[in-house]
Image (cartoon, grey):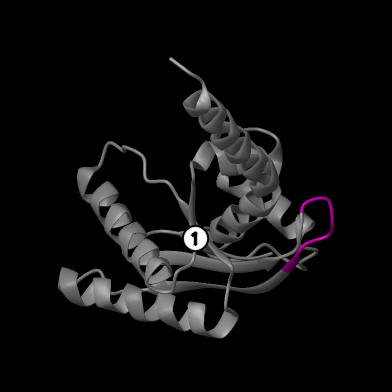
Amino acid sequence: MRVLGVDPGLTRCGVGVVEGVAGRPLTMLGVGVVRTPADAELGLRLVAVERGMEEWLDEYRPEVVAVERVFSQHNVSTVMGTAQASAVAMLCAARRGLPVALHTPSEVKAAVTGTGRADKAQVGSMVTRLLRLSAPPKPADAADALALAICHIWRAPAQNRLQQAVAQHASAVKGRPS
């Protein structure tokens, strides 16, 4: 499975591509950051994020796009920019018919480090180990994007089985007489 992880942000949007399957060593194919100038007009910044996403999708051809689920923060302007960048990433994936998976920051941290309360340095350190890199990806947004991709690869098989079980249960319940 090839996954494009996206750590959404309006100034720095982390992107990373990881390939592999759960239980086997994973391979990093690419990592980087789509940047936009903080003083540029919002519409132009969103277009720049879109162009960056399209370039990554064109170059790496992922099967799935894993995006960090936006959660409420104290700074409304920060969460708005994050949500807008997240929406652009999801739109680019949907336009190509690619599935989008959303993972919370604590899910990603728990998957990669074993604890949902890990700090950025711990996430970067574990991403470095898991992908057998010589140094942690910089900035932290890039490491976080790789962590999202790793999380999805590891969680997808269990999530798929759960979705199938729920669908089978719903189908069985629907077929029962009232």
Q: Quadrant of the C terminus?
A: top left
From this view, report whether residue 178 is shown above or below residue 26: above
The reply to whether residue 36 is visible in this rendering is yes
- List x then y, in percent, for residue 90: 38, 62
In the image, what residue occupies the spot 50% across and 77% down? 57
Vertical comparison of 152 with 40: above or below: above
Front residue of this view, candidates 32 and 3 = 3
Dominant SS in magenta: loop
24 up-or-down from 19: above or below: above
Label 1 SS: loop
* The magenta segment: 22-27
Quick check: is 15 in the magenta stretch? no
Query: In this rendering, would 43 be left or right of 158?
Result: left
The amino acid pointed to by label 1 is: Pro
Q: Identify residue for label 1.
A: 99
Q: Image quadrant for the N terminus?
A: bottom right
Farthest front residue? 177
Q: Residue 112: where, in percent of width, then height?
A: 68, 45
Whether residue 118 appears in this view of the structure is: no
Residue 106 at x, y = what percent? 54, 36
On the image, which quarter does residue 128 sit in?
bottom right
